[in-house]
Amino acid sequence: MDIAPKKVYEALVGKGVSHIHHVNSVITACQFLRQGSLMSRGTIERKDLFQTKQKSDDDDKAYGIWFDVFVDSVDIHDRAKRANAYGPVMFVLDVKLIEEAYTGRVWVTKLNPTKWEGKSRNERWFSSAEDLKENFVKGRFDQMIVFRHCGGELPFKKYLKEVILDDPKLEAKKDEVDYYSMAYGALRLSMTEGGIDVPIHKRNCPEKCTCVAEYQADTKRSREMYSPKI
Ligand SMILES: [Zn+2]
């Protein structure tokens, strides 16, 4: 529920959160870099921009969060040792974005919206700054920070620290270029167009990470996630 951004910021910093993370496909990440804003899925659709489909889309529309912008308090790929379902590109943003960006209000989920069916408002969302202080746990995947009523666009230029890109160790047959290099080039170009200059780092996977096996097992999905064009 509605919690003042400054209070959310203070609670998160108190829990050791220094950065927030947003994960997406290459094509969508490129659009964000060109615009200098994270955009809700609803905003991308309204602007007639292309985005890769996500399993959660129907739920997001049904629950009225289609125009909201979601970020995580931790690097889920690193913690879970698997590919992130939302894509191979991760934006690492300074947590100060929460305090300083004008967004109206910041809400924090207690449960991932994919698990919301039959749950009350109190089970879905943190209710207050006190609730956050008591019950927020850094690293719990269900607890996502949601920028609501922000017009579906969250300017991030000042706060973007780096971009982490997964290497699926796959080649695009037609062009004989590997996916990582193709994505790197597209992200770099989009940064230039958006007036952004931050490092793009290849992800250093934790031991026993299964992401490469996942990317290689579903090449159709990987192609969608890495293609910079429709
Ligand atoms: Zn990995």
Image: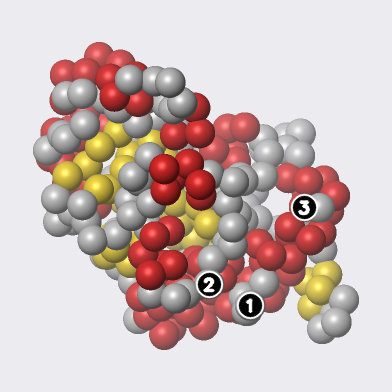
Q: Looking at mark 1, is its residue's CB closer than 8 Å to ligand 1?
A: no
Q: Foreground residue, 57 or 145?
A: 57
Residue beneath disc 2: 50
On the image, the x and y values in percent for residue 94 come to: 31, 50
Q: Could you give the CA–CA distance between mark 3 and mark 1, rounded to whole angstroms?
A: 19 Å
Task: Out of 224 and 140, give the one closest to the viewer.
Answer: 224
Q: Residue at x 85, y 82 (%)?
A: 174
Mark 3 or 1: in front is 1
Q: Amino acid at mark 3?
A: Tyr
Residue 170 pos. (x, y %): 82, 63
Q: Earlier in the sequence, mark 3 or mark 2?
A: 2
Q: Is mark 3 within 8 Å of ligand 1?
A: no
Give the amino acid at mark 2. Phe
**Residue shown at the point (38%, 36%) measured from the top left:** 144
Q: Is residue 156 left or right of residue 226?
A: left
Q: Give the quadrant of residue 44.
A: bottom left
- Quadrant where the N terminus is found in the figure: top left
The type of residue carrying mark 1 is Ile
Q: Residue at x 45, y 31 (%)?
A: 112
What is the quadrant of the C terminus in the image? Answer: bottom right
Observer-nearest of 104 and 156 = 104
Q: Residue 48: x percent and y percent?
A: 44, 76
| Sequence-first disc among 3 and 1 | 3
Q: Is residue 67 above or below residue 140?
A: below
Residue tagged by mark 1? 230
Contact, mark 1 vs mark 2 (Cβ under 8 Å) = yes
Residue marked by disc 3? 215
Residue 55 left/right relative to 193: right
Of 2 and 61, nearer the camera is 61
Mark 3 and mark 2: Cα distance apart in space: 21 Å
Specify which label sits upstream in the sequence, 1 or 2: 2
Residue 174 visible: yes
